[in-house]
Each structure stands twice: as C-alpha cells, then as structure tokens.
Amino acid sequence: MPVTLQQKVEPGNDEYTTKLDQAERLLIAGQLQEVEPIVAELLLQDERNPRANLIAGIFFKLQGRSADAKSILRPLSERDSSVGAIAKLHLCEILLRGGEVGLAIETFEALKNSKWTSNQDRHAAARVLNELGYRHDANEQIRALLRFGEATLEELRCLAAPERAYFPFATKPGVESIPKFGLLNVARCLHSEGDIRDAVEIIRESEELADGNPVVVAYWGQLLLESQQFDLLDEWVASTESKLQRYPSYWLAVGGWAMRRKDFTSAVRCFAEAICREPASVSAHDQLALAFAGLGDLQNETRFRSRATEVESALLQTRKVIESPVANWSDVVDLTVMLRGLDRPFEAICWAKLGAQRFGLSADHLTKIETARQNELRTESSTSSLKSRLCGIEIDRYALKIDDVIAAELGSKKSKGGIESAKLEMKCLPPKFVNVAEQTGIHFLYRNSAPPIQRAFRIYEAYGAGIAAIDYDQDGAVDFYLGQGAADLPDGPASDANELFRNLRGRFQSVGAETGSNDFGYTFGVTSGDINQDGFPDIVVGNMGENTILINQGDGTFVSHAPGTDSWRESYFTASVAIADVSGDNVPDVIEVNYLDDKSIYEKVNIAPNGVIANGPRPLQFIPAVDRVFVSDRQGDFISQKLGDGGSSDAATGLGLVVTDIDDDGKIDLYIANDLMPNFYWKPTFEKDSAVNSLKFIDQAVAKGVAIGNQGMPLGSMGIASADFDGNGLLDLHVTNFYNQWSNHYIQRSDSGFNDQALPSQLDTATYPMVGFGVEALDYDNNSTIDLVIGNGHIEDIGDGSEFRMPTQIFSGNGTTFEQMNVDGDPYWNRPHLARSLITCDWNRDGRIDVAVSDLLEPFVLLENRTQSQRNKWIQLRLVGTETERDAIGTRVQVSYTLAGSSRMFTQFVTTGDGYMCRNEPILSFGGETMPAGVDISIRWTSGMIQEISNVLVNHRYLIVEGDDAVYFD
C-alpha cells in the first residue's frame, strides 16, 4: 500500500512542525534510513504527538515490524480525526496480512463510513483489498467512493465483474503465484478459466481455510457446489458461521445447496441476498430466475431472466468502453443508460464523468454531471433502491429454512476435500474406427450457403445439418438421410437438396431424387419414425421456414404431407425434430425444437481490417423461438400446440433434443438443450381418452436439476446423449456445451432428480476447451460399460489465434469415470474438424457400433468400428409396438444373466430425438465381456405391458414384437 498521510499542522513550534513535514516526505519517498533518527527525535520531544506517532507506526509497518506498528497504530486508530482514519487504513493492512481478517474487515468498514476518511484513503483501502483478493470488501470501499463521484476506471471495472480475479494473469497461475498475487486472486483466476480442480486444491491446502478466514471459507462453499462435492457441501452448510453472511459467495453456495434440495423459497432468499451485496453478479440473477421457476412464479422468473441479460449486457458494454480502441462518447452514454436501468445510478454518474474527461467534453457538461450526483444524493432511498434492484420483490417474504434442514438432516460427518471418484476395474480396448464413406459410395458435402462460405458466418450458417438413420425399404440394412443447406437466405433457392443414401449390403446408392425425398429447404434437423403406423418409417425435416413431412409409401417412394393447420407454415429456425407419442393415445406426434424467430439473423457479418471477427452474431442478440408439438388427431392430420404456455417466457434457443421416458414413470418426456438459456425438461400431462386440448406440458428442468450446470449460469448447450452411464437402471443425460464450458453429465438419482457429475466423472478437463456439438452414448468395445463419442468444432474462425477446427473425441467409460482415448484406424482421428451432427448405427451388422458424422465444411464420414472386441459378446434388439406405437419410444429394456453366482443387469431405453439434429439407428445394443451364451430379456413397454423372454442366444440381432413371446432374427 502506498504511504498515505495528510498534512495537518499540529500545535507546537515551527521547528517541530518542519521536522514532522520532513519525516513525512522522507517516508513517502521510501527513504527509511533517514526517517528513523528524525522520528526518534520527534517522539523524544513529544511522545504523545499524533502525527509523530502516525509516522512512527507507518515506519515500523514498512520495516516489517508488525507488532511495534500495531502497538502504535491501534490506539491512534480510535481517534476521531483524520490521523485516526489514516491509522485505521494502515492497521487494516497489517491485520489482513497477519491473518486477522475478521478484525481487519470490521476496521475497514469503520474506515469506509468515517467522516474523517479521505477519498485517497478509500482508494488505498480498495487497492489493498483487491490485491489480496478480497473482492467484495474492495467493492464496498469503491461503492463509498461512487457517492463522491470519485471512482477510477479500474475500480469501475471491478464493480462490473465482481467474481473475477483482480489481476489480469498472462499465464495460468499456480501455488508459486500466491505470494505475489494473493491466494484468492489465484484461485479466482483458475476458477473463472475453468480450472476448478486446481482452484479447489489451492484453497483446500491453504492456511487461510484452516484458520477460518471468512472470505476464504465463504468462497470454499461456492467451490464445493460448483465442483460437485455435495457431501462436503452438506458439511460446510452445517458448520458455517454468521460472519460468512457478509459475502455473496456464501449466499450463492447456500442457494445452490437449497436448489438441490428443492427448497426454492430459501433459494430465492439466498440469491436475492447475493444480489443485494453484488448487484452486478450475473450468476446470482440467473439462479434467482431458476429459483422462481422452481416455485412456479412465472412473472418473477421472466423478470430475472431479463435482468440477468441486462446485467450481462452492461458488463459487455463496460468491457467495450474500457478495451475497444474505437470506443466513443455514445458508447459511454449507452453504458450509463444501462446502469441507470439497473438502479446503479452512482456507477452511471462516475462513468459519465470519466467519459466526459476522456473525450474532452466541456466544463458545462461536467457541471451537469456533478449536479446529477448531488440530486441523486438528495433523493436516494436505500429501501427503494434495494427493491428496484430486486425487480420489486419483497425479500423478507421468502423465509430461510436452512437451520431447520440442518437440524433435521445433516449429521456431523467429516470428509476430506478434493474431487474423488471410485473406479470400477473394467477392461477397455483401444478404439479403432475407419472412415468408409467414400469407399462405400457415400459422397456428400454439406454446403452452408450458395456458394459455401468459410468464415464470417451468419448464425445459422455455422450449425450444419443433421443425419437420420432409417431403414426406409425395410430390408434390414440401415440407410442414411442427410440434411443440406445450399442456399443464400432469405431469398436464394437451395441449389442442392437433402439426400437419401440406400444401403445395398455394402454399397450405398444416392436415391433422393428417385424416391421423392430430396427436400430443397435449408435444413437443420432430420428424423425418422413411423408417423402413420403402416410399418414403413417416414421422415420429418426441420428447415429454416416451413418444415417437411415425407410419408413413406412402402414402394420405395415418399410423398410430402403438409398438416392442415396454418401454424405448420409459420417460419422458424427449426433445429431438431422427433416423432413420438407424447399425448398418450398410442399414435405418434411430431416434436419441433426451434432456435430463433428473428429475421435479423440474415444480416451479413463484418470482418475488421485486421481480419478479426470481433462481434460475430450471438444467440441472445436475437429473439428466441417457442418449441411446438404437432399432435396427431388420429385422422391423418395434426393440431399444433406450443410447449408451456406458448408465451415469451417459454421461448428459448433450442438445439438438442431427447425424447423418451427419462424418469421411468411410464410417460414420455422431452429434454431440450438450449443455447445460453436454461434447458427444458417438459413433462406432458393429459387425460386419456379426452380431447386433445387436455394435453399440457410442464417444465421440470429446475426441479430435476438439469436446467443449468453447477457453474450457476445457463451454458451454450447443444448436443445430448442419453444412457444409463452408472449402471443403476436409470437414464442419465450428457450435454455438450460451448468453448470454455465443460460438458454437463447429469446422473439420475432414485428420486428422479439429477446430479451434475462432470467433474467426478473426469469429463471437465477434456471437454472444457471444446465447442461440443453432436454427442452419443455407445459401447464401442462391447465390454458392457457406456462410452461417449463427441463431435467438436468452433462456430467461427475468429482470427484471434483460437482454435477453429477441433478433434472428434472418444471417451471410454468404466461406469463411474471416463478416459479420453487415442483412436487408431484412420487419418480422420489425426486432424481437427468442424463436426456437427453425429449418430450411432451398426451399418454392416457386425455387432460393433459405428458412428456417422456430418461436418460444416468437410464431407460426411462413416466411421466403421473395427475395435478388436470379437471376444466380447453382444446382442442387438429392434422393438415394434402393438399397444404401444410401433417405434416403441419410451420402452425400457433390461438384459440380465447370472454368472458364477453373480447377477448382472443392464438397462437401455428406446429413444428418439437422439441429440443434435439427428436420429440414431433404432436398435438397442448390449455388450459384455462375461456375457454367457444365453441372456434374459425384460421389457416394460410404454403401454405398461411387461414382457419376459428367457435364454436368448447372444451375438445376434433380434426383432421383438409387443405381446409376442417369440423372438425373431432380424
């Protein structure tokens, strides 16, 4: 801390005062050796002189003689004078660095509010607190400065980003950085850059945590929540002290803990308390919206979703004003308008003052700004200001129930910190996949425009198109339907159509034109399913604009069918589609996931003269769209129904989709991955045998814990994989996210809620630097545990040195954790790509699951699985419903056997939607190293029928029909 002294003439002779002034000048200049004899002489002459004692105390502090300094500064700090204020400031620094944090913070608070404290002192206090990582305490000093119109540019930046480290780190810091930058700054840097494991370890091993430093202990709770160490979080909540309640981290942690327990009332209170302390906390606003969603309070959920967006926009505008070389006065004006709208008027006034000075505005303008500050001081009301920041809610209406829960549920168990996972010892084989697309006759290149463009994408030009596996001719060999763009929207017609490739037992033939399936829309999502229940799979195409239904005629051709409802012709950016019975009448409906509803998406993207794309399109700058279901009227037509209430609060940036009975309650659920908005988990409710309008959809994503990840904010979610990853018989969900956001790995509990287990599953580090699109679950080596394949690639070649193309990844699972594997067999795995949609299939019917991938700029690939897993057994099942609709979506299948007295059981579900703009081959494939020659199969059909089949031979594919106890080779 710079030496802070105020010149004030004390009573006494002129010679004594001259020596005091000389000592101050030498002290400020750092000439300590010359100060010492003068101080000694001054104290000898008058040992009670306040200025002499202040100089002596600061001198001892600078020499590292903390005990001597405290003995002098402590009594001085109690004086009601400017000397007392300066003594408090230096005493605080000694206390902080000596670990007496609680006392230091109390002293800083007294300093902040003292009439004798100068703004110079407050600047110095904020600086030392920030340098040590006490960001909230520093911001409290800065907020005091705001009222005087005196905050600096750096201090205003701190207010706008309260959760970031104070120092800009050029490289990743470590333990060795702590002495220079402070424990909390190092941990916050690691945390904000996604290295949460390292942040956890640095805090866990720190003396500050062991000593009960309240700032560190509060932050530790937030880290425990976000690193998914829920047992330790329980202990932390049970042991916290009231002094932690000063800090936003405490309230964020306790609020997250309450959310997991579905105590949404307490969660509302917690997140509101966090906002009261740091009104620029984006995560607190996001989570408060989710807490209101849990309460079913749509009005307040909508308010805080909007407020979270406004807070984030103000942060982005702040960065623009500070960092952009072309920032101008109008940018400052825009920022001040935003801040006033967020009820942060003193921040707005300080920005206006700094902007006026920076851009050379007149003295009259500065006078008007000062007048505005004075007016604000006269009219401000802390109560009304707080209520405005909280969008009008009465915080006291939401009672905390934390103590009751602690007393009733939490014991005194103690665990060691650290992110740990138990591993099952499973033998995984090295994966080997070979691209056989070209040699088998599949020549297909997706085109994102006409002609294709390589960068500066409009938002829709970056997302690619989907793949649907379909056996359209029912010959037992999987065919592929591939989406195409190939148009310069909004007016340009598509130059190329979607394509259907027929599998002729080893060779594929392009048959789109001759089958009538060659839709010329600008396509994103595609799917297949038996809409009219005639035994032949149909196709649904999700386009920009009107979507297409292609009805399979059973003679090798398709006929386009447009539902009679006018809403079918409404123009949306449809990302994913699916065919499933969501209305409970055993007849399939069509699900449509829409991304945006905004014509401004067609505006061109500008490239700066240096080649950098600084402000590419972002999803939240456009109007999101409402998702829809087209419910079959059982007469060959459909009735349109929007998900939720159909209002703006249910509009979102939907991309990925999975449809099945996720929570195993016998009803079909819809899980939708939204881009930078909370994900949806739609639960249909209906009365059987009643009118179609009895069907309603309720979003349970918040209640089930799958709306957002443990980072506390909505993520850039895109793809979804579903499987029983942990082997407990329940369906789990894996969601891919944007760059610098690791995947979510939601593991379902017995109460049908989910825990995000990305970190314990060891999926964070490898997925964090990727932009994940398509993802699928598979057992690539047939060893019985579920693996993952993820297609990655950025949405723009920004030109700033960041990676554009990214590798496709395979992760081997052992039931608990995942390991990224090196893949052999093809040059494809040695190069990065722009993978988009991704599906699984067994195209050559050898019992090993293959993978097909679409790419934004490269040809379609069919990755044939050649992993040396022949010693492992397998069985594949295709199901046909009779009481259930024919595709049997939502049906649960369990394969079990007993070996050496030990029983094993594996569970899979029939799904559709299948992730990102796609449809997998509709087979269930089970593998096992120890699987015997015959296995037992138990099926719970969506109709509720239970079907048991015993001793089915392995290493074959079978057709099973609902109600028919025979199995048929397929």
Image (cartoon, rainbow, N blue to C red):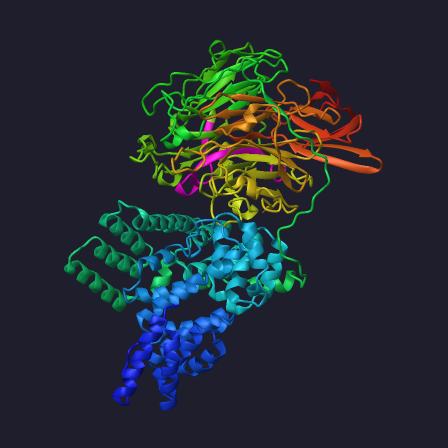
Q: Nearer the viewer, residue 281 or 62?
A: 62
In this picture, residue 329 sits left or right of residue 763: left
- The image quarter in which residue 19 lies: bottom left
Position of residue 29 measured from the top left corner of the image (x, y, whole percent): 33, 71
Q: Quadrant of the N terminus?
A: bottom left
Q: What is the span of residues highlighted in magenta in the rendered image?
A: 639-666
In this picture, residue 886 sits left or right of residue 288: right
Q: Nearer the viewer, residue 202 or 229?
A: 202
Q: Is residue 750 above or below residue 3?
A: above
Position of residue 226 measured from the top left corner of the image (x, y, whole percent): 54, 51
Position of residue 767 measured from the top left corner of the image (x, y, whole percent): 54, 39
In this picture, residue 64 sits left or right of residue 966: left
Magenta span contains residue 357: no
Q: Quadrant of the C terminus?
A: top right
Q: Nearer the viewer, residue 882 or 730?
A: 730
Q: Is residue 257 above or below residue 863?
A: below
Q: Residue furthest right?
A: 900
**Residue 251, visible in the rendered structure:** no
Magenta span contains residue 663: yes
In this picture, residue 911 sits left or right of residue 697: right
**Residue 549, visible in the rendered structure:** yes
Q: How many marks?
A: 0
Residue located 51% across and 47% down the image: 194
Q: Nearer the viewer, residue 301 or 596?
A: 596
Q: Is residue 694 above or below residue 412?
A: above
Position of residue 365 measured from the top left corner of the image (x, y, whole percent): 17, 58
